[in-house]
Amino acid sequence: MASTPTPLKHTHMLSAVLHNSYHRKKVSLNGKWAFVVDPYETGYRNHRLGIPHDEMPLEDRSRYYTFFQNRKPEHAADMVEYNFEEAATIMVPGDWNHQSPEWLYYEGGAWYRRAFSWNITKGRRVFIRFEAVNYECHVYLNGSKVGSHLGGFDPFNVEVTEAIRGGDNLLNVYVNNRREEEHVPNKRTDWWNYGGITRDVYIMETPEVFIDNYQLQLDPHNSGMVKGNLRLSSALAGVEVSLSIDELDWSYQALSDAEGTIEFTTELPNVDLWDPKNPKLYEVCFKALQDTIVDKIGFRTIAVKGEDILLNGEPIFLRGVSCHEEIPSGMRRAHSVEDASFILSSAMELGCNFLRLAHYPHNEHMVRLADEHGMLLWEEIPVYWGIQYENPETLRQAEQQLSSMVHRDKNRASVIIWSLANETPVNDQRNDFLRKLKHQVLSIDTTRLISAALDRDELDYSDTVKRQVRISDPMAAEMDIVSCNEYLGWYSGTPDQMEDGVEWFLPNQKPFIVSEFGADALAGKHGERMERWTEEFQDYVFEQQLKMLEQIPSLRGIAPWVLFDFRTPRRTLPGIQDGWNRKGLISNEGKRKLAFKTLKSYFSEKILQYESRTLKSGLQ
Ligand code: GCB
């Protein structure tokens, strides 16, 4: 009897946030792991029942083998049909697709295994942290299940205090990147679905009670004041918690309440404010019981007033670009500090002060670097196109991804916008879905702006009338910044049709950002400016767009699509696309296309324009 695998619904919610694990002491598990590709999920599901081994009734489990048991034949006649010792190896972190030509388009299940040794320290708790695994992940330590996770771009922690042994340990990780309708994103995206353990993995030790989560940010509504909160890992009352910034000679103490939390608003005098020209970070030390953790935090405010976006009270223009987390020349996911720095420096070369990290949470390295280099960020989750807005499981997954992104980055000065979604169809269920997401962000962080990349409509027009574009999405009214992806001159008409101008109908009294516009061009393909796919056509689109956008009084930023050409199996045009989206300003081989220069000079003009408007405080 053939068995159809049941879709997986279960996943444990992993409770510890372990905020700022970035600066916790840790032991890296990066490196070479054994790797077994398992397209039929043989090592994971019972082949007759089709259900995962760890969901089978206990009495049945021993009858069937699974790869996490790490069995070895004891006698020559024993039958064990897997062998990690003889298996292929793979580098962690790193998507599997680029690591062997056979795995280039692989989507499905795979097993990872690595051995490590450990010294147990009494009274310490131990966690394994995965910065990201795409998409479904089950973790087994020494043959026992210790956790699981769904979601391709958000970090999670698995507590292994009980399961870890002094001496040798074996860690098995099952990963499946099969696309599913109920996932976030679902089956249809315009980017390649890299699989595997794509970001760092490490072990962290904490005291029995540790500082699990905190936030310290300037109060956007009270100048000179800082808002803070901190949560211990246990609901312990009366624990003395202290925060200090030596450089400012500042400290704050409080006792935890019955939930193990503190919450306060207090003065933070003499702060040198963080901004793109002065990305000043302070070392902040948090202490409670045996736990001490240091973070680097920049202090700034971000707010909107009418049509302005105010950074530290001064109007700014967001000179941005959108980017994926991909190293195109390597056809791989970016995962290291060096990778993040490569992407960031390419945006800085354009003259950007703003980067839209599309379409999912990027690596923490990127956010930390942006803090150090003064780059403003838009972060988003892959609530993208037509996911299942009516499905509570889809909402749960979106909320989990959003909450872990906001928790991870809520102390980063660079992050100014949380984006809830990208190009999502307007209907009641979707509106409700986005409202729930907004509510969730606000339950964690009230110091940043909320937006979403919305669609726009075009009104009917004839050749004699100016084109008319409007945003009629009701969610626009609920955003701090109205943003939309508009592709005039590419998906909608041609660039010459923009010569007569375009009339925009936008919600009143809100800043407006164009979160995407662009055009495909194959680097090195030249021709007339009305010949599609040439650099000249792309450049013409950019020229027309920039001219048009300048006419919009509430325009406060742009993030054109996209910094680099990126891989996407949706794009099949032979000789031009061949599996790549060619809207990059930089090609997959690093060539700057004509439009790169056009955008760069627009940004230099913007710098001058804003410099003269903000002489008092200097350019943001
Ligand atoms: C969009 C999407 C982006 C696509 C882009 C395109 O609106 O947000 O993910 O890659 O258009 O090139 O069509």
Image (cartoon, helix red, strand yellow):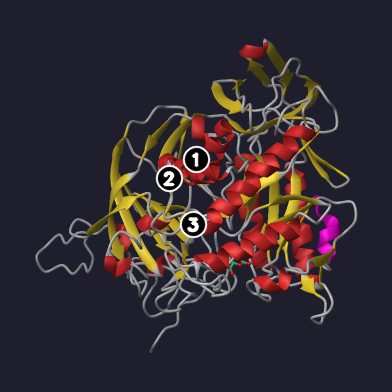
Q: Nearer the viewer, residue 146 or 36?
A: 36
The x, y position of residue 409, in whole percent, is: 62, 40
Cα distance in 3D space between marks 2 and 1: 9 Å
Q: Foreground mark, 3 or 1?
A: 3
Q: Are marks 3 and 1 in contact (CB under 8 Å)?
A: no
Q: Which residue is the site of mark 2?
A: 339
Displayed quadrant of residue 338:
top left
- Relative to 465, does residue 476 appear above or below in the rendering? above
The x, y position of residue 167, in whole percent, is: 28, 36
Overall secondary structure of the magenta section: helix
Q: Quadrant of the C terminus?
A: top right
Cα distance in 3D space between marks 3 and 1: 19 Å
Q: Which residue is the site of mark 1?
A: 365
The residue segment tinted magenta is 474-480
Q: Which residue is the site of mark 3?
A: 564
577 on left or right of 86: right
Q: Quadrant of ligand 1?
A: bottom right
The x, y position of residue 567, in whole percent, is: 45, 65
Q: Residues within 10 Å of mark 1 (few under 14, many from 20)?
A: some
Q: Nearer the viewer, residue 86 or 616?
A: 616
Q: Foreground mark, 3 or 2?
A: 3
Secondary structure of the residue carrying numbered label 1: helix
Q: Are marks 2 and 1 in contact (CB under 8 Å)?
A: yes
Q: Residues within 10 Å of mark 3 (few under 14, many from 20)?
A: many
